[in-house]
Amino acid sequence: MKLIAAIVDDKDVDKVMTALTGQHVGVTCISSTGSLITPGNSTLLIGLDEESVPQAMSVIADLAASRPSYVPYTYAGNLPATSFAEVQVGGFLSFVLDIVHFEQV
């Protein structure tokens, strides 16, 4: 048995959870918050058999991929204050852990 702990952007978490539960994979979501400007993330805890890990990771990778976004920035040079910088947002971080004992009550 394995446990996937995946940290996913809040904008992607609903899509990922819907896709995984649609494949009968149980998911527990633990929400967190970002800073003043940065959006939040959620940690998904996914328990499954070792054979199902590649399929679950594929779903997460497809639905939580990084994407470009534009944020305003201030520059002291000749550029106006309304200039924007392209940054990558989204993506995910995951850990696959071995589970020694599992109990469901």
Image (cartoon, rainbow, N blue to C red):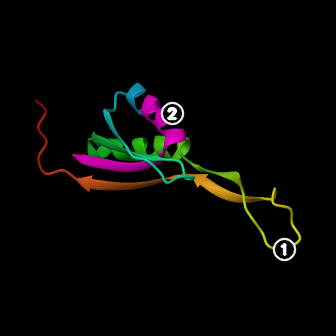
Q: Amino acid at mark 1?
A: Gly
Tell me where residue 12 appears, x and y as whole percent: 52, 40
Q: Which residue is mark 2?
A: 15
Instruction: Please give the range of residues in magenta.
Output: 1-19
In this rendering, would 3 be left or right of 74?
left
Tell me where residue 100 appears, x and y as whole percent: 13, 51
Q: Quick one: 50 or 36, which is closer to the camera?
A: 36
Tell me where residue 52 appears, x and y as whole percent: 34, 41
Residue drawn 34% across the image and 32% down it: 25
Mark 1 closeness class: few <14, some 14–19, many ≥20 residues within 10 Å? few
Q: Is residue 9 magenta?
A: yes
Residue drawn 54% across the image and 43% down it: 62
Q: CA distance from mark 1 to mark 2?
A: 41 Å
Q: Residue furthest bottom?
A: 77
Instruction: Tell me where residue 56 sits by quadrant.
Output: top left
In this rendering, would 38 be left or right of 5?
right
Q: Quick one: 42 or 82, which is closer to the camera?
A: 82
Mark 2 closeness class: few <14, some 14–19, many ≥20 residues within 10 Å? some
Query: In which quadrant of the rendered image does the C terminus lie?
Result: top left
Residue drawn 53% across the image and 52% down it: 36
In this rendering, would 18 be left or right of 97?
right
Q: Amino acid at mark 2?
A: Lys
Q: Residue furthest right?
A: 78
Q: Which residue is mark 1?
A: 77
Q: Quick one: 9 or 77, which is closer to the camera?
A: 77
Tell me where residue 18 appears, x and y as whole percent: 45, 29
Residue drawn 35% across the image and 46% down it: 53
Counting residues from the start of the chain, the first of labels 1 and 2 encountered is 2
* Dot 2: element: helix
